[in-house]
Image: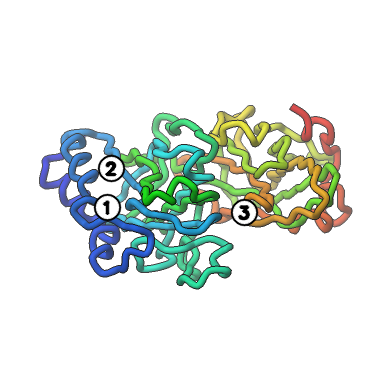
Amino acid sequence: MAFNSGMALQRLQVLTILAVLAICCLPLTYGILDEDEYNSIYREQLREEVNQEVGRFPFLMPNVRPKTPELYLCTPIKVDFSKSYYIVGYEPNATMNTAHHMLVYGCGEPGSSKTVWNCGEMAKKSSEDTASPCGVQSHSQILYAWARDAPKLELPEGVGFKVGSDSPIKYIVLQVHYATITKFKDGSTDDSGVFIRYTEKPMDKLAGVLLMGTAGSIPPMSVEHMETSCEISENKTIYPIAYRTHTHSLGKVVSGYRVRPDDHGMHHWTLLGKRDPLTPQMFYPVEDKEPIVKGDLIAARCTMESHRRRITEIGATNNDEMCNFYLMYYVDNDEPLNMKYCFSQGPPSYYWSNPDVGLNNIPDKDASTL
């Protein structure tokens, strides 16, 4: 599909409306450059994208200068509501020496009208105005996640994340976690982010991401299992594509399963994927592509090993922990799951083996070893 320069310019202008219009009206809280400098990369990209079927949009932090450790910053783009776009890939523009991790959210509304805002859990300890990535009452889902120098992600042929038009995703928000700020003490700025690959060519296979996670805590000097599970209660068939794991420094193994009950109430566990979460945190192809249907469960476990002499809580900083398993999937001629997140209370309250959870035939050793 070819685009003339007028069409491409209109598309670019709409996608960047927040980033362009808001800069001139905001204080340089994070060291944002002026409008001409900020948009030069977009004009350069425009010249390259004319007459290309797949566009490549640079969605980057606008040269921010983080001033406090463990800072989470968000920046939005607005999608053209009159058209449907399909995201088919992500190319990270970041290194783990600068960005601890990045998330890309699909939102009904952004959490703030600002060009850049503080959007982390640690924000409550700051005097600056803060907000979540997506508006409190709006649609929110994760479209992409990156950490530890993971490479680019390309979705399978014919699969894409639908945004704009009749999709609930009207804005896309980039969140970057800056764990340390040493490199910014000399006045340097940062443009970490992703290049979003997209097309206007209609697709029947729509992608989605289910994020599994837990709350809870890890006792000192112990090995702990942080577990969660959710039943697929919607009358939809999902086709697993890829998985991603995420913990901080205590994670040893993160595993995810499709769990299917038989007529006798026995659970049959099929491995979707497991990784050492301290390797590059990219999306890896699933181990089993068999469709997941209504009545199946998705279960995830993070095996954590602590040599600390203190309790480690789930939280946003490197001193805390996280337990996440992302499952990327697609649906064929249907809408992705309404369920975007599956979280449990975690230890010491929630385990797969709890009577009220009801899971049986648990692959205990397999779930915690590579």
Give above or below for 298 relative to 15.
above
> Which percent across, then down, holds residue 26?
30, 68
Up/down of 331 relative to 106, above or below: above
Picture layout, residue 308 above or below residue 68: above
Name the residue type under label 1: Lys
Report if the CB atoms under discs 1 and 2 are less than 8 Å apart: yes
Q: SS at mark 2?
A: loop
User: Picture coordinates of residue 98 (x, y %)?
Assistant: 47, 43
| Screen quadrant of the N terminus | top left
Q: Which comes sooner in the sequence, label 1 or label 3?
A: 1
Of 163 and 110, nearer the camera is: 110
As drawn, is 101 to the left or to the right of 30? right
List x then y, in percent, for residue 188: 37, 48
Q: Quadrant of the C terminus?
A: top right
10 Å crowding of disc 2: few (<14), some (14-19), many (20+): some
Q: Nearer the observer, disc 1 or disc 3?
A: 3
Which residue is found at the position 40% from the left and 29% from the top? Answer: 157
Question: For the residue marked with disc 2, what is the amino acid?
Answer: Glu
Please give left or right for residue 232 compared with residue 330 in the image. right
User: Residue 200: which numbered mark, if any?
Assistant: 2
Check disc 3 and report its element: helix, strand or loop. loop
Q: Earlier in the sequence, mark 3 or mark 2?
A: 2
**Mark 2 or mark 1, which is nearer the start of the sequence?**
1
Amino acid at dot 3: Thr
Provide the residue designation for mark 3.
Answer: 317
Residue 2 in view (yes/no)? no
| Element at label 1 | loop
Residue linked to disc 1: 83
Residue 251 image point, x, y percent: 71, 40
Mark 1 → mark 2, Cα distance in angstroms: 8 Å
